[in-house]
Amino acid sequence: MADSEDIFLRAKHRTFSGLTEDAEHEWTGPFFFIQAADPQLGLMKAWRDGDCDGGGEEWAEEVELTKQAVEAVNQLRPRPRFVVLCGDLVHAMPDTPFREGQERDLKAVLKGTDPTIPLVFVSGNHDLGNTPTPRTVEQYCSAWGNDYFSFWVGGVLCLVLNSQLFYDASACPQLKEAQETWLEEQLSRASSSKEPKPKHVLVFQHIPLYLKTPDEEDDYFNLQKTVRQNLLDRFKKAGVKAVFSGHYHRNAGGCHGGLDMVVSSAIGCQLGEDTHGVRVVVVTADDVIHRYHSLEQLRAGGMDEDLRKLLQA
């Protein structure tokens, strides 16, 4: 396995160095990737104890579940092009007890991922703090790579965003402005006739735009209406096909106006009726098809056969 510097700090200069070769700008046929969210080491016991703000001193359960996810992904044939973890990597907020240990143990588990499968990390509210600061963002970047960046894979443009800057950037307005400027440039290039035309544009962020419908009320688990509508308009204009997120610890989402809002449940703590799992995402020339698989299901039988057949088209 490559050393940790190569594994975890690959998103410098706002591009992802594992998948930036010019060849990745070209469509070469169907492929798939794995989207996962919220391993959130430390939440399961804290949730049971009713102490989500101050708990989190035990995380062996989440370590075991993440190991199961790694084992399931490693068994897949063909290999996924990448695995993206959509935020809340750990439960302990920045500068709180247990943070260092949780990050250390999560990295140790993730190092078991087959080295041919790139890992893509997305920042969540527990990774940055509910109100991030320049200091907490820098801490995250030092540990996991940039908080927003882009990469190409198989002719598809992928944008990784820091959704906490949409939710509450009151303590770091300059960072919000920087991401906004960068994002507008990325979206403009995606729809430009002068740039390589992506087969699809995909977005990855922690907080969903919405849980069920674009006009739903503001909630802890979605982005505020004004922010949400602004992003929806910009994404649709740029031809974004799907937005993948976590945060809700339940499966949710919906497709409206040609844009698919995908909300995936957690590797770790479940807050609804779903089971611990990850999402298999198949990308074809015309569509992006996805389905949540339990860890047990994926380990025992791999991805569903109908999804596998799409890769042979």
Image (cartoon, rainbow, N blue to C red):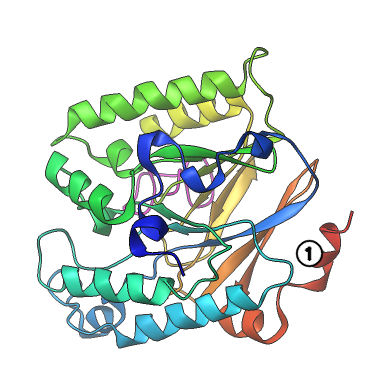
In the picture of the structure, the residue carrying the numbered disc 1 is 307
Viewer-proximal residue, 260 or 215?
Answer: 260
Q: Determine the image quadrant of residue 161.
A: top left
The span picked out in magenta is 208-223
Find residue 23 and report its horizontal and vertical position in percent: 68, 37
Find residue 113 and report its horizontal and vertical position in percent: 50, 71
Viewer-proximal residue, 196 or 132?
Answer: 196
Magenta segment, prevailing SS (helix, strand or loop): loop
Mark 1 is on which residue type? Leu
Find residue 95 and report its horizontal and vertical position in percent: 10, 60
Q: Residues within 10 Å of mark 1 (few under 14, many from 20)?
A: some
Image mark count: 1
For residue 106, side relative to residue 248 (left or right): left
> Hey, which residue is sitting farthest right in the picture?
313
Viewer-proximal residue, 117 or 230?
Answer: 117
Find residue 309 and report its horizontal and vertical position in percent: 86, 64
Give yes or no for residue 170 being in the magenta stretch.
no
Q: Determine the image quadrant of residue 197.
A: top right
For residue 152, side relative to residue 168 (left or right): right
Viewer-proximal residue, 283 or 115?
Answer: 115
Give yes or no for residue 218 being in the magenta stretch.
yes
> Hey, which residue is sitting farthest top in the picture?
194
